[in-house]
Image (cartoon, rainbow, N blue to C red):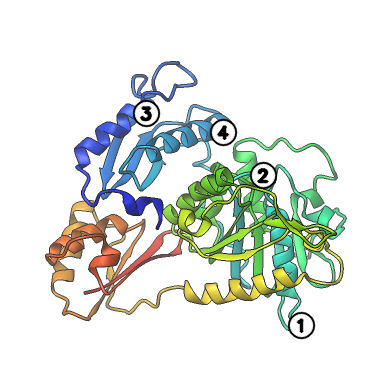
């Protein structure tokens, strides 16, 4: 059972918003001091169906400070009993650089690998997953090292830069025989990296969009650790088909990973599941030993465990043979991608993009009431339409969360500005 499943079904919206505001009073304005509410940094707090939206003006801060404040606001909101999701909206230092990234037109599938914190083996999992996918003779695979602050892929794969450009001026990824890879580490020549603000976003954009990936069956992206603004920009801009989370079994690591899962879900990126790394090790005597206290990972994250990797030199061997565990992981990831693939949207789907909020809600409820039992209702929106689902439940006299009230309920982000919701009465 996921954490939010134990929250009471009905939480008065006004009371919940007041409790969130009370919690936010402990967050300090890093510029003026005092509470972010008293200083006016937080302009508004609204609640809809246990989803909290915090309007904040962070444009005056540098990027690291804005990231810290955003995370502090989200943490306080999510710590409020009754809150399932929390987003911070408003102008940020990255707004000018956070444009949608096109690029990689020849790539069929983009898989992101992420972790809530550093040191859990995210890059090891990313690289071994890419190698395992590339082990299939007819499968072309790329690896994009988007970890700007710790680009370790070149070292793991023994790659050397600098990269060269093709006739069109696009950077050519390095080919290590089985897969192609691009990393800022192939450009920086081992110089210390101190990306700030728009520089970091520009680096992500240029590395992804201006790389001559060619025709690839799959591209694995090694995201930076954490839930900062670079990760958020990647989720909102890159065409990610599914994400793999990496965690150790330690309860605090799993708890932090749950926040990463929430961030991905809020941005409509399908979660494929979790890789549990450093599960334990087997000593020379043959006995198995745990490295960390045990946590109920599937219940905590409400996501399937894709595989459990031992603390073993085989997992960190990037030679010719792919470890059996990561070979199995690759097949499981492909199966999960089929399960969470794009929704097929019929021509008669209700498209609400560009309409005022009041009209969206009115049109959605009226058209849904007109559907027959057993008929699927499709809705397209330019942002997450999940809050509308609660109104659809009420519109037909049902009770409970949409997943329980309807025979089928799914929300999927098909593109940065295209969300699809399907509901079957």
Label 1, secondary structure: give it: loop
Say which label, 1 or 4, has the lower sequence index: 4
Check the image and report above or below for 217 versus 199: below
Q: Residue at x 53, y 73 (%)?
A: 336
Q: Earlier in the sequence, mark 1 or mark 2?
A: 2
Residue 131 in view: yes
Quarter in which the N terminus is drawn: bottom left
Q: Percent x, y for residue 183?
A: 75, 54
Q: Position of residue 277 (x, y in %)?
A: 67, 56
Q: Which mark is residue 63?
A: 4
- CA separation, marks 1 and 4? 43 Å
Q: Which residue is mark 2?
A: 118
Q: Does residue 103 lie above or below 49 as drawn?
A: below
Residue depth check, mark 4 versus mark 3: number of the one nearer the observer? 3
Taking 107 as reference, is 162 above or below it? above
Upstream in sequence: badge 4 or badge 3: 3
Q: Disc 3 or 2, which lies upstream in sequence?
A: 3
Residue 137, disc:
1
């Amino acid at each position: 059972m996921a954490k939010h499943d134990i929250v009471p079904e009905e939480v008065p919206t006004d009371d919940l918003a007041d409790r969130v505001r009370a919690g936010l009073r402990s967050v300090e304005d890093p510029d003026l001091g005092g509470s972010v509410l008293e200083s006016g940094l937080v302009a508004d707090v609204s609640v809809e169906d246990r989803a909290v939206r915090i309007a904040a003006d962070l444009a005056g801060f540098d990027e690291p400070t804005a990231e810290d404040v955003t995370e502090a606001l989200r943490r306080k909101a999510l710590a409020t009993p009754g809150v399932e999701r929390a987003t911070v909206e408003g102008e940020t230092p990255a707004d000018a650089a956070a444009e949608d990234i096109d690029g990689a037109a020849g790539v069929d599938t983009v898989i992101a690998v992420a972790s809530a914190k550093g040191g859990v083996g995210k890059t090891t999992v990313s690289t071994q997953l890419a190698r395992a996918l590339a082990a299939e003779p007819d499968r072309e695979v790329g690896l994009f090292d988007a970890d700007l602050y710790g680009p370790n892929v070149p070292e793991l794969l023994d790659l050397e830069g600098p990269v060269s450009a093709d006739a069109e001026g696009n950077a050519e990824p390095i080919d290590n025989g089985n897969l192609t890879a691009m990393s800022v580490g192939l450009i920086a020549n081992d110089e210390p990296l101190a990306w700030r603000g728009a520089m970091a976003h520009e680096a992500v954009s240029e590395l992804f969009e201006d790389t001559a990936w060619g025709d690839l069956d799959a591209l694995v992206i090694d995201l930076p650790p954490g839930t900062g603004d670079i990760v958020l920009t990647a989720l909102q801009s890159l065409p990610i088909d599914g994400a793999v989370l990496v965690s150790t079994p330690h309860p605090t690591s799993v708890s932090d990973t749950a926040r990463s899962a929430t961030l991905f879900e809020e941005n409509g990126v399908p979660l494929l599941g979790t890789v549990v790394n450093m599960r334990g090790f087997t000593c020379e005597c043959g006995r198995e030993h745990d490295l960390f206290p045990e946590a109920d990972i599937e219940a905590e994250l409400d996501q399937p465990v894709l595989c459990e990797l031992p603390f073993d030199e085989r997992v960190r061997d990037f030679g010719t043979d792919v470890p059996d565990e990561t070979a199995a992981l690759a097949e499981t990831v492909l199966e999960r991608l089929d399960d969470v693939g794009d929704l097929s949207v019929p021509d008669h789907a209700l498209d609400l993009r560009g309409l005022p909020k009041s009209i969206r809600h009115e049109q959605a409820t009226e058209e849904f009431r007109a559907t027959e039992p057993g008929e699927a209702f499709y809705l397209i929106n330019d942002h997450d339409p999940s809050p509308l689902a609660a109104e659809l439940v009420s519109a037909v006299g049902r009770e409970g969360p949409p997943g329980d009230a309807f025979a089928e309920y799914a929300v999927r982000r098909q593109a940065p500005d295209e969300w699809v919701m399907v509901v079957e009465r």
